[in-house]
Amino acid sequence: MKLSTRELATLAVFGALWGLSEISLGSVLKTLNVPLSGLVLAAIGLTVALTGRVFVPKRGSTLFIGVIATLLKLFSLGGVIVGPMVGIITEALVAEIVLSLGGRPRRSILTLAGAFGTAWVLLQPLVTGPLLFGRTAFAAWLDLIDRGGRLLGIDTGFAIGILLAMLAVHLVAGGLCGWISWDIARLLQTRLGRPAPSATRS
């Protein structure tokens, strides 16, 4: 991936926006113990990253934005937070894979990238729990079902139903972010006097 100085600066700006939202809003949501705070942060971050992808429609640009955001997360209060850092970089990687497979950015591809990116938020504890924090996959699974059941008001005996419902919430939220990011990018590019992405690609 070859990037001009202007493109690097553009990606750095979007990466900084994602990172700053994680640093500022992340601390607030954690303190208030807001439900689905990980989903909220991922949705905001991916909206920023996907908007940036429209500005720099090159393979690797979304991942680059995620790397910048992850590095900025190092400055969060309380020191290095491994879980959120892994989350940011993986969300960016998942979105990057979808975008790279889909070709030039268009609304439908951004929607899919957002949906799959936020889906990782739900699945991350099942992966990072055993690998990074010494938890068993079964314990992580029980915790996921317990939190989902309390949030949705569903008995934990319906584990598969809870998982599917939570997955649907994450996919829809991420899809909406991808959908909106297309319009945000068009609006910003119009105001900046740059050619907006073609409406025929939506």
Image (cartoon, grey):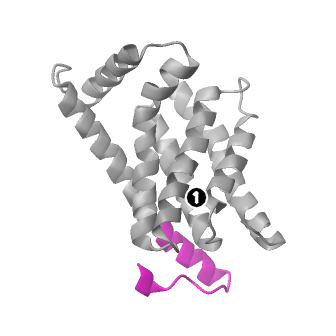
Which residue in the structure is indicated by mark 1? Answer: 48
**In this rendering, position of residue 3 left or right of residue 149:** right
> Quick check: is 119 in the magenta stretch?
no
Residue name at image x 23 percent, y 31 percent: 162
Residue 118: % across, % down: 44, 46
- Between 137 and 166, which is closer to the camera in this rendering? 137
Find the magenta span and give its range: 181-202
The part of the image, by quadrant, that contains residue 77 is: top right
Instruction: Name the chief secondary structure element in magenta.
Output: helix
Residue name at image x 65 percent, y 71 percent: 56
The part of the image, by quadrant, that contains residue 60 is: bottom right
The relative height of residue 67 versus residue 122 in the rendered view (above or below) is below
Residue name at image x 39 percent, y 53 percent: 115
Residue 109: % across, % down: 43, 67
The part of the image, by quadrant, that contains residue 187 is: bottom right
**In this rendering, position of residue 198 left or right of residue 157:** right
The relative height of residue 95 versus residue 140 in the rendered view (above or below) is below
Residue name at image x 40 percent, y 31 percent: 35
> Quick check: is 188 in the magenta stretch?
yes
Residue type marked 1: Val
Q: How many marks?
A: 1
Disc 1 on helix, strand or loop?
helix
